[in-house]
Image (cartoon, rainbow, N blue to C red):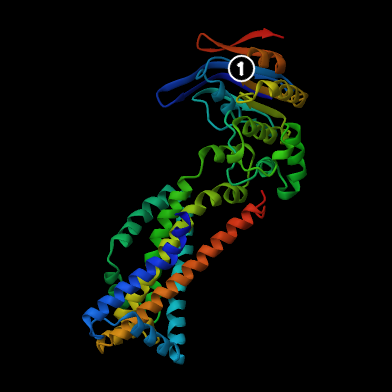
Amino acid sequence: MIDFDGVGLSYGEKPVLAGVTLHAAPGDRVALMGPSGCGKTSLLRLAAGLVRPTAGTVTCRAKRLSYAFQEPRLMPWLTAAENVAAGLDGGAAAMPDALRWLEAVGLAGAADTMPRELSGGMAQRVNLARALAREGDLLLLDEPLKELDKALREDILSLLDRCAVGRTLLVTTHDAHVARALAERVYTFRDGTFQLEQDI
Amino acid sequence: MKGWRLPAKRILAPAFWLGAWALLAMAVDRELLLPGPLAVARRLVALAGKGGFWRITAVSLLRILCGTALGILGGVLLAAGTNRSKLLEALFSPLLAVIQATPVASFILLVLIWVGRDILPCVIVFLMVLPVVWSNVSAGLRSADEGLLELARVCGFSRWKTTKLIYVPSVAPYFLSACRACLGLAWKSGVAAEVLTVPARSIGRELYEAKLYLNTADLFAWTAVVVLCSLVIENILDAAIAQAGRHRRMGGGEA
């Protein structure tokens, strides 16, 4: 589904990634762990085609992407439900699906709420609902539980686990528990690159 | 104290300045130099009773609104083009900077060589409005959130969907601010063009003739017509913006 072969990435003079080789077949679930700024998000951006590698190649064979960015990126002029529906095809016809996904993340009552009225955790759940609603064959989750209350983390983790079944998943996290719960393979940033940590 | 703010702004402040004007006119005591507000109002009522008044006002209004509409349309299209193409931006930026810096009187006299006096005010308004709308809409397009544009790419938005969901809402405040600024500019430049070229059936011609025959009350009355027209259009624009906002809040702008 996605192959990183000797991938390097620099922003100007600043190297972000070097020599990353990682392969994910359809249905594989991969977690990327490491400290802030080590290039986890950059790997997801490379996978989504938002940036091009400065060395090596990225080959993505996904037909449809589901990408939950680290920050919610909600359109401030749309309600929560409209933000979810915006990620789908079909315009107004997508609204029932959007409402269903909002309910799945526990925000059924916030469908008509504007993003400025949402807490950080609620906005993050709308972000996740928008990504999951797309039902892409490649699921890219960047710190999916960021800003979520402890009480909600397990529910959302369980939802993400169910949604990832049969799809290729690339998830970044600081949390080893999240990595183990969602992924079969965990890559950790060590000695300047991502190395396979363990098979679960 | 808050309850006083609205009446103070809407009624008391204009009343104060009308009173000051009346007192000054009484002190000067020569209608030729400074007619009072009552004299101007009487003249305005008398003018409004004549059939020609409404026709003159309508023709000037039409010229200015046509120039404004064309300037807004041209400014938006140009901004869309220069936002997409560096070449277009490099080509048009200096031209628009020159247009913005050129005195309106120079334009009026220059353009008079090329076009008839009846459509000249329309062309002048177009030239004055175009760079203002272009620069504002360009700023709005540049302000579009890069994160949302990336989201659009990831979600595979069509160009139309990206424009509708991201660019239009990002540009809207800039565009509306440009429209409000342009209304005043359009009336000032349009009437100035009419005064300098005196086309038939125009407020500018009436102002010119009032000045020529030292008919100061008429000069004030026609100026009041310009101010009133500008205020009415500004209020219509404000009402349209408020209506659009209400429509949006009631869910009229679905994704």
Question: Which residue is at a point 53% across and 29% down the rendered structure image?
Answer: A52
- Helix, strand or loop at label 1? It is strand
Quadrant of the image for the C terminus of chain A? Answer: top right
Q: Position of residue A164 (x, y in %)?
A: 74, 24
State whether residue B102 is above or below residue A83.
below
Q: Position of residue B51 (x, y in %)?
A: 46, 91
**Amino acid type of disc 1?**
Leu
Quadrant of the image for the N terminus of chain A? Answer: top right
- Please give the residue where the numbered disc 1 appears in the rendered image: A32
Seen from the viewer's position, the closer of residues A4 and B117 is: B117
Residue B71 appears in which quarter of the rendering? Answer: bottom left
Question: Which residue is at a point 65% across and 44% down the rendered structure image?
Answer: A79
Seen from the viewer's position, the closer of residues B29 and B109 is: B29
Characterize the local packing of mark 1: few (<14), some (14-19) or many (20 or more) Cα atoms within 10 angstroms: many
Q: Position of residue A190 (x, y in %)?
A: 54, 9
Seen from the viewer's position, the closer of residues B169 and B17 is: B17
Chain to which the residue tagged by mark 1 belongs = A
**Residue B60 visible to the viewer:** yes
How many numbered marks, from 0 up?
1
